[in-house]
Image: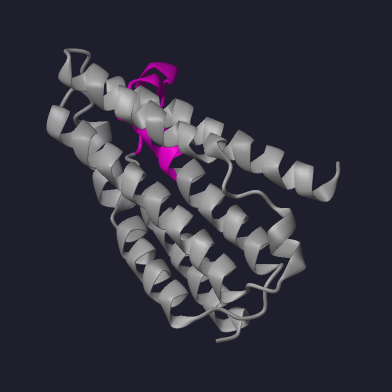
Amino acid sequence: METNRFETFFDAIIAIVITVLVLKIPQPASPTLSAVLDLHTMYIAYLISFLILYNLWYANHNLFGLVETIDNTTLWIYGMMTFVISLIPYFTIWLANNPNSIAAETMFGVIFIVTHILNTLATKAVYRSNPYNTNLREINHDSYYMNLPLILIIIGFILTYSGYAQGIYYACLISIVLWVLIGRLIRRGHDGN
């Protein structure tokens, strides 16, 4: 399958999920700075989720700029990833409304982990479906640095289940920033900038 139609579909899903996510943020109770600051957990949860979604879009935009076709395996993996990312607004709001809930933390962390794993599998599937693409071979997506965000989330799980209720929450924040930086470094190494 040519990637143009798929890219349009994936872009639309990301845009819809981000729109739903921002619409779930409540208005401050009053027009004061204090009321705005009372929603700080909502804003941080939104930031984490937005960065996850934006990073997925940006990484896939760059990846699909290098390929022209994908196979059915790739489509199925992206289909699963689309399902998982459609759940991000639900679990983001649950976490933002219950920042000390281990259940909310756990589900938020699980969504992050599953998204990261599916993105890794999807990238590898794109590589396999384009074995002769020299542009793809030049990019090192097999770098062990790509697993650092996953390791940080696991540390967050350990912290949360050891007594620090917001361990996963903060691990997700640090992980997504790290995920963005690692992606930039890999692309910079490929572009030679």
Residue located at (70% from left, 53% from top): 139
Residue farthest front in this picture: 132
Residue 42 or residue 36, whichever sits in front: 42
Residue 147 coordinates in the image, percent (x, y): 47, 37
Residue located at (61% from left, 37% from top): 182
Residue 126 coordinates in the image, percent (x, y): 55, 68
Residue 92 coordinates in the image, percent (x, y): 30, 42
Q: Is residue 70 above or below residue 33?
A: below
Q: Is residue 45 left or right of residue 119?
A: left
Check if residue 29 falls in the magenta segment: yes
Residue located at (46% from left, 73% from top): 74
Name the image quarter holding residue 78: bottom left
Residue 165 visible at all: yes
Q: Is residue 176 above or below residue 3?
A: above
Quadrant in which the C terminus appears: top right
Residue located at (55% from left, 78% from top): 70
Q: Main secondary structure of the magenta part?
A: helix
Residue farthest bottom in this picture: 1
Check if residue 41 falls in the magenta segment: yes
Residue 39 visible at all: no
Q: Is residue 115 above or below residue 123?
A: above
Q: Which contiguous range is marked in magenta?
A: 27-49
Q: Is residue 21 left or right of residue 103?
A: right
